[in-house]
Amino acid sequence: MDGKPTDKANQQRKQEIDALTETKHALKDSRHLLQMIIDTIEGEVFVKDSNGKYLFVNNAFGKDFGVDPNDVIGKDDFFVFMPEDAEVLKKNDRQIMAGKKAVNVEENGIIRGKQVTYLTNKAPLIDDDGNVFGICGVGVDITRQKKVEKALRESEAKYQDLYDSAPDMFVSVDTKNANIIDCNHTLANALGYTKEEIIGRPVFDIYAPDSAEYAKKTMFSVFVKTGKIEDEELQLQRKDGSKMDVSLNASAVRDEHGRILSSRSVWRDITRRKGIEEELKKAHHDLERKVRERTAELSETVEKLRDAEWRYRTVADFTYDWEDWENQDGTFQYVSPACERISGYAPRQFMDNPSLFREIIIPEDQDVWDKHCQDCRREPEAREMQFRIRSRDGAIRWIEHACRPVQLDQGEVLGFRASNRDITDRKQIEIELSSALSEVTGLKNQLEAESSYFKEEIKLAHNYETIIGESDVLKYVLYRVEQIAPTETTVLIQGETGTGKELFARAIHDAGPRKERPIIKVNCASLPANLIESELFGYEKSAFTGAAEKRVGRFELADGGTLFLDEIGELPLELQPKLLRVLQDGEFERLGSSRTIRTDARIITATNRNLDEEVRKGRFRKDLWYRLNVFPLTAPPLRDRTTDIPMLVSWFVKKFERKLGKSIRAISTDTIARLQRYSWPGNVRELENVIERAVINTGQHGRLQLDGTLEDSLPRYSEAPDLPIKSLAEMEREYILMALKKTKWQIHGHEGAAALLDLNPSTLRGRMRKHGIQRPAYQA
């Protein structure tokens, strides 16, 4: 009896143990199955306790975060996230556990050096008593999706800008009710509405009444059948009631079954073209009327001329002078009998052989006669001249010739009436008087010629008008010109060939206190070395072989005015001490004279050379360099002021239109862009030559046409070496550092970095602060 209960109890206990073992295996299998399911999920699955410590993560979590899942257990978000990102995640967890509600939240972080964005579904873990004991979640990496969404938004904004700013008018119409469903700002602005006032209105409301009727009855039904409208000309009505002519093209938008849903239309304003067509029609009618009136007037004038010719011949036959009437083709309509007394040839000989008149003019005067005839035909007006003929008996006779055109009332030239008077005796007296006074007249004329030469060189030869451009770099140079112009300070203008250094020199002179006196120019590169000294300082008679008379030098001529020494870098080294003396003392002597002459001239110099480098190489005196470099000014190259190219092109086009007699009606933006891409080694002078060739090449279409030489000289970017590209800020910082090191961190003064960079010292300091440039301690 004692054993039976014991056996029964053991058996029951064994059964309980087997059941517990089976349950344990089942739980283990279930947990293993659950683990496999979770590990196959692509998102990051995790479970945290209420303190933010990880209790469980799946394989995807470890793979995405680059950690072993087992290493994460017991650690918090600081293990895988940057501290600032981990704090945000912990804050989100606390809010979700406090709210006891599952939430989808976007969370950002830096993982393995990359910025990522996750969309995480987080839910609090709540026990049976309603207490939160942790949080679980599933996260999905949406970084790529966010980038795509951003790119789509930017693309949509870009194309919306293109749509709204297009020069043509765009509109979309719902074909079901003919209402406007979209339009661009160009259409709304052209009609005087806002887009909001246009969208939703029937499209026929913005047509002019006649066009609206045509659109409803004809055009709309054709569009429904064909799905397109091509080059229809209609009228729109603006908000203020005025009309606008447009050309319409439209295409259909269809669904997947081919049914028309809406129309997309492009309207182009042709109001100006229609106006021109009307003006041309009117001009054509006016021209026909004027031709009829002109024909009638010509008939009447011919009759008057016939009567005048009869009267003229009656008088001319008895005049003492040799009269003639020459036709436009050079033949003679009439020659008076007096020609035989003067030339020895009968009138009939000139009538039969018109070239006889030129043949009897002596060879030395024939060119003068030919030019007179050309001038008369180019600009018909009364003219006088003198020439010599050889009469039939061999004698030389002086003829005073006067002629005037024979014109109709409307200005048409039929020929020329001429009178030829024999002035041989009077001319002989004049020659004798001229010979007697030749020495006095020669000296007087020479002095007048010298004065006229220099003044005309200043006022006419250079034809200075203005400096074209509005770029910041040009405005800065003009600001510097305004600073220095009112003073007497010596100015050195530096710049590449063709940058207009002479224009800046003239601008300084014209704005200065000496503007009433001339500015005298000397190009040191255009004169041989042995002539520069005599050109600058002048010479006395017999100072050297060939010095037949005294000559005033340019320094003497510039007294009280301005002397502009162009290409000063070309001045011979042996002449530089003399120039230095004039700059220091204002004194010099003419060649062949010991008398000291004083001069008061403001000096402006220009060069395309680096004079600092020339000084180091011993080709330019240092003391002269310091004397000239009182106020340096740099003429900017054209490649640094490309924004001025459109204005320069327009100015040169107008100049060569007048010169070449052409009309340029359009300059394409592509042409301007091509000109702005070119490097312009020859600067503004090269641009002027290019535009002159382009105007010559332009045909009847009137659109400026560049020739092939510019294409050949455009920079070939495909052949450039593959160099790393730096930002403008990096380039500016490096260039400022280079200048500071070159000047040993000296900012002020003519040898400082500000002068080297052509900047105001305060501007240079501001840019140093911008780029974080500080003077090294050992340079302090």
Image (spheres, helix red, strand yellow):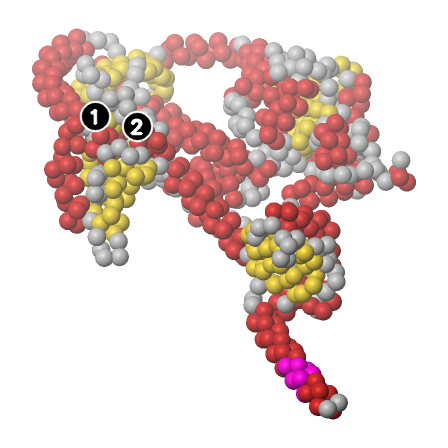
Q: Position of residue 430 (x, y in %)?
A: 44, 10
Q: Is residue 152 left or right of residue 95?
A: left
Q: Is residue 756 visible?
A: no
Q: Is residue 317 left or right of residue 639?
A: left
Residue at the spot of label 1: 279
Q: Nearer the viewer, residue 65 or 651?
A: 65
Residue drawn at the location 21% of the way across and 25% of the way down: 279
Which amino acid type is marked by label 2? Leu
Residue at the spot of label 2: 191
Q: Is residue 98 positioned above or below 650 on the image? A: below
Q: Nearer the viewer, residue 273 or 757?
A: 273
Q: Is residue 544 left or right of residue 399?
A: right
Q: Residue furthest front?
A: 1
Q: Is residue 352 positioned above or below 83 on the image? A: above
> In the rendered picture of this protein, how many numbered marks are placed on residues?
2
Region of the chain picked out in magenta, as a range: 10-19
Which amino acid type is marked by label 1? Glu
